[in-house]
Image (cartoon, grey):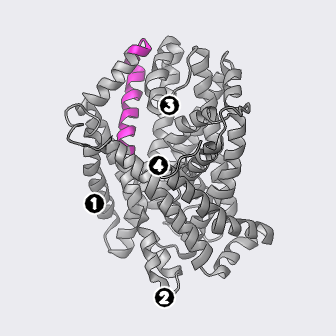
Amino acid sequence: MHKNRFSRIGFILAAAGSAVGLGNIWKFPYITGDNGGGVFVLVYIATVFLIGMSIFIGEVLLGSSTNKNAVTTFETLAPKEKQYWKYTGFTFLTGLLILTFYCVVIAWIFNYIVMSVTALPTSFKESEEIFMSFLKEDIYTQFIYYTLTFIMVAYTISKGVKKGIEKLNNILMPSLIGILVILLIYSIQLDGFMKAVDFMFMPNFDKFHSSSIIVAVGHAFFTLSIGMVTILTYAASLDKNTNIVKASAIVVIMDTVIAIMAGLVIFSITFTAGQEPSKGPGLAFIILPAIFHEMGTIGIFLSLLFFIALAFAAITSAVSIIEPAVMYLVERRNVSRQKATYGVALFAYILGIFVLLSNTSAFSESLTFGSKNLFDWFDFISSAILLPFGGIMIAIFIGYVLDKEILRKAIVPYTGEVFYRIWLFSIKYLAPFAVFVLMLKESGIITLN
C-alpha cells in the first residue's frame, strides 16, 4: 500500500473523526428532544441516509476517482467546456472560517478538563458566573489553550496522512467510543436514564412541526462534514480497492450511534439531578459541571471523561478541516507539506484571535457588527450560507455535469442497479432541493412553523 494512503479502517476512523464533532455531543441530543423525540429520530435517520449520505458518497466518489486535491478533482472530472467547475474545490475556504471559532470552543474544553481535576463549580449560579467570567474576562487563559489547540492540529497535519491524520484518529476515535461506553454503562444505573430514553425516543407530535424536518436536514448535512470538500480530500488518499458505499455507510452509522449515546449519557445525568436540558454551551459548560460537583468523587471522574471525549471529538474534526487547504497548496502550488500546514494554520490562527476577542468585554464592542459579534457571524455565515452552498454545488456537479459512466462504475459493482438509481435520484433532486430550502430558512429568507 502507498505510504501516504489511508487503510480502509484508517479512512473510516478519519472520516468518522471528521463527522463526529461537538454537534454530536450537545446539539443532536437537544434538538431531538426539542423537535418531537422519537418521531424526530426517525425523520433524522431517513434524512441522513437519503440526503446526507448521498452527498457523502458523492464526495468519496469524487476524491477516490482522481486521488487529487479538491480543485484538481473538479477540474479533471468536468468536461473541457465546463472547467469553471474547478472553483467548487475552493469551498475548502469555508473550513478555514469554521476552524477559527471551532478552535476557540476547543480552548474552552481544555479549560474545563483542567477544572475537572482542580475545582468544579459548586452551584449552577457559580457555574454560570465562572463560564461568563472565563469567556468575557480571562483572555490570557483562553489564548493559551487556543494556541495549544493550533499547535496540536498543525503538528498532526504536518506529519501527513499515515503518520499524522490516520495515527491520530486510530487512537482518538476508539478512545472516544470507549469513554462514551463507560459513561453510558454508568448512566444506565441512574434514576434519570428512563426519562432520558423517553425524552429522546418517545414520539411527541406536539413538538414536531414542519420546521423540525428542516432541522433534521440541517443536522444530517452538517454532522457529516459535507460541503467543504473535507471528505473528498480524505477520499483522495483512500485505497483503490475500498467499497466506498460500505465505508460511507459505516461512517454515517458511527456518527449517528455516537450522537445517540452522548444524548443518553447527558440527559440521564441531567434528569437524575432534577434539571432540564438547555442548549449548547449552557448545557456543556454551565449545567453539567455543577451536576458533576454534586456527585462527589465519581463526578470528578465523569467530568474528566466527558470533557476529554468532547476534546477528542473536536480535535479530530479540526484536523480534517485544515487538510483540504494544505493538500491544495502541496499539489497545486508545490509548497512543502510543512510550509503549507504552518502557513494555513497561522492564517486561521491570526483570524481566530479576533474571533476569540469578539466574546470578551474589552473587545466585543469593536468586533460586533450589526446584531452579531465576529464569533457569531462566522458561525452564521458558514452554517447558513457557505456549507449549504458547497453541498448544493457538489450535488449538482455529480447529478448533472459528471459523466454517468464514472458514477455507474464506482457504485453499481458494490451495490447493484437499484441502489444506484435511488442514490442518483437523491443526489439529483432530493439533496439540492432539501439543502436549498435549508439555506433559505437558516438565512431567514423563509420561515417555517
Q: Determine the secondary structure under disc 2.
A: helix
Instruction: Say few, some or many: other residues with alpha carbon within 10 Å of mark 2 (under 14 / 14 to 19 / 20 or more).
Output: few
Element type at marker 4?
Answer: loop
Residue 237, visible in the rendered structure: no
Location of the N terminus by quadrant is: bottom right
Observer able to see residue 274: yes
Report the side of 372 relative to 445 (left or right).
left
The circle on residue 444 is: 4
Secondary structure beneath label 1: helix
- Res. 343 mark: 1
* Mark whose residue sits in front, 3 or 4: 4
Identified by mark 2, the residue type is: Glu
Q: Earlier in the sequence, mark 2 or mark 3?
A: 2
Q: What residue range appears in magenta?
A: 102-125
Q: Amino acid at mark 4?
A: Gly
The image quarter in which residue 184 lies = top right
Name the residue type under label 1: Gly
- Tell me how many marks there are: 4
- Which residue: 39% across, 39% down? 106
Residue 279, label in figure = 3
